[in-house]
Image (cartoon, helix red, strand yellow):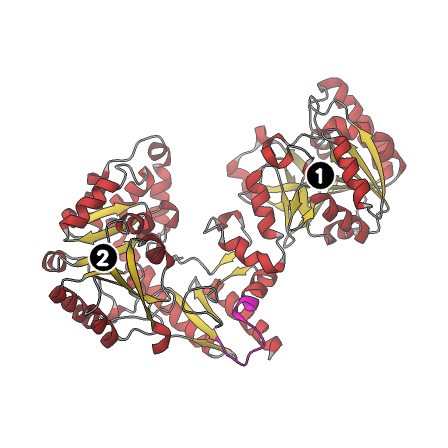
Amino acid sequence: MQAIMLAAGMGRRMGKYTENHTKCMMTVGKKTLLERAIEALKQAQVDRLIMVIGYEAESLREYIEKKKFDIEIKYVYNYDYSITNNIYSLFLARDYLRKDDTILIESDLIFDTHIIKDVIEAPQPNLAVVAKYEQWMDGTMVVLNAKKEITDFVDKSGFRYEDVNTYYKTVNIYKFSKEFSESQYIPFLEAYLKAYGVNQYYEQVLKIFSHIKNSELSAYVIENENWYEIDDAQDLDIANTIFAQDEDVLKKYELHFGGYWRFPKLKDFCYLVNPYYPPPKMVSQLKYFFGELLTQYPSGMNIQRLNASSMFDVDEEFLLVGNGAAEIINVLGKIIKGRFSICVPAFNEYIRCFESCEPHFIDSSRNDFQFNVEQLLEEIEHTDNLLIVNPDNPSGAFLSYDEIMQIIEKCHEKHVLIIIDESFIDFAEKDKRYTLIGNELLEKYNELVVIKSISKSYGVPGLRLGIIATGNQTIRKFLKKNMAIWNINSFAEYYLQIQRLYKKSYISACDKIALQRKKMIKSISGIKGLTAYPSQANYIMCKIDENSNLSSAQLALILLKKYNLLIKDLSTKKGFEGKSFLRFAVRNEEDNHKLIDALKKTLGEIQ
């Protein structure tokens, strides 16, 4: 068995990353793509690699000679690499195809090394490695029958989104028998080149075989294996995340700050969102108006305030709508001055953005990460600004309405600005749920500022919505002046407009989270080595017992690498130094069970 790698292309879309070398020399996770491919070939006992080279050919050869790979390497030159495509590169290597069974591989791939070995050991002599279509995939698709025979190749021009459930993406790894290459593929390859020219793709020839009744080409479907095709800088970033070294992998994921839809196998227990909302009917309504919303400008700030007024049943004069709560926090931080008191651990954006203040941290760990009302009341005597996230993030600790009003009254008496983030309060149990966004409170307490992220409890983080409510005219005027007039898009505006039609569904969705949280806390409490903290949010903070052989970072890594579950390791967060704490989002029941099972297995193995 031999391998042919097509590595002649220029990789124009990679920009600076292929300025002086080919795509297979790009580094992912401290190894080049070529190193990884050769490791896979050697593991599969492939003893010869034929490389079709062109762009930066001598640079590539020098690199290979310097590395001294323990595999025989032959070279085929495509001197016309700038005006031809991969069909011509493969045609140039046709004499090698005739000599032996061949693994054909492209140079811009990264994949789990065992895939090559598994494909070689598969009984079918001619295979195309494919994976079920996912939203990040681009390029050639195939359609399979029940026997996993390829019945069609679908190029970009024939791609139909309404058919994606039937598509499989070609991974660009193939196994061809010597007989297939000699008697079928090479003759068709030569004929196709004569008919259509050199600027084509070799898959177009394979498409012909898929339409032949007795075609010998089958699919080898991979499911849980990791792989990625690297066509541009963003692909490279994602590959560097998936294939990062163990000591780097968690940090790589965290540095994305979301965007995990690019990792479809991943279950995100890190970012906090309502899985039960919005309801299907609301999503359908948004889809129906997609074309109109996409092509129209959104309204200005004043109209967004009217929409928010309807949504929250409060006078629009008290409200401003932000591009997520993050925009509001960032602008608010530019006006807040003086001593700024905040419970830690806390949402880092408040610490980062309130840079003009003198921060004073109230260490909640001294009270087992719960709020101490007396301590907060005492703090009001010594500060200019007090921030409370309620329920707290990450602990889930909660202040009742009576407790929070006691604090607001004291702030009013002492003329201390109090900022309350109630982004998670709708997840509290029914009898504990309340809001401070109301005309009476905002009129009475000029010192009160309420922030609410709509992303969290309303389940639409992609729309980037948040509000600030306050009777403080100075703050409102400053925010109006410093926020863009078109700070949210038309989809977000329309969402604000129609949300009132789905209030009952929203309340029901929050009730479901409260129920799932209760079940989840009970399940975690039954796992030896893990302690769950009480919570009124859509997340649960847990502590790994001090006598455990596993740290929070190690547990987070195992869950990610072994189970594709991303959780929040809190060990690097202020207030958790040297401690093993984790935070789990509450998702739907099926996903929560997967997490609980993974925790039981992992912690059970190390007891």
Specify the quadrant of the image occupied by residue 235. Answer: top right
For the residues labelled 1 and 2, the Cα–Cα distance comes to 54 Å
Among numbered discs 1 and 2, the one appearing first in the sequence: 1
For mark 1, does the 10 Å Cα neighbourhood hold few (<14), some (14 to 19), or many (20 or more) residues?
Answer: many
In the rendered image, residue 165, in percent from the top left (x then y), is placed at 55, 44
Residue lying at 53% horizontally and 61% vertically, measured from the top left: 565
> Which quarter shows the N terminus?
top right
Q: Is residue 497 above or below residue 598?
A: above
Query: Closer to the camera, 23 or 200?
Result: 23
Element type at marker 1?
Answer: loop
Numbered tag placed on residue 215 in the rendering: none
> Which quarter shows the C terminus?
bottom right
Q: Looking at the picture, which amino acid does disc 2 mark? A: Val
- For label 2, the residue is 450
Numbered tag placed on residue 107 in the rendering: 1
For mark 2, does the 10 Å Cα neighbourhood hold few (<14), some (14 to 19), or many (20 or more) residues?
Answer: many
In the rendered image, residue 85, in percent from the top left (x then y), is placed at 70, 26
In the rendered image, residue 599, in percent from the top left (x then y), is placed at 54, 71
Q: Looking at the picture, which amino acid does disc 1 mark? A: Ser
Specify the quadrant of the image occupied by residue 249. Answer: bottom right
Specify the quadrant of the image occupied by residue 175. Answer: top right
> Can the viewer see residue 103?
no
Looking at the rendering, the stretch of residues picked out in magenta corresponds to 544-555
Whether residue 54 appears in magenta in the rendering, the answer is no
Residue lying at 25% horizontally and 37% vertically, measured from the top left: 485
In the rendered image, residue 455, in percent from the top left (x then y), is placed at 35, 52
In the displayed structure, does residue 516 sit left or right of residue 174? left
In the displayed structure, does residue 567 sit left or right of residue 108? left
Whether residue 546 appears in magenta in the rendering, the answer is yes
Residue lying at 51% horizontally and 37% vertically, measured from the top left: 161
Query: Closer to the camera, 397 or 44?
Result: 397
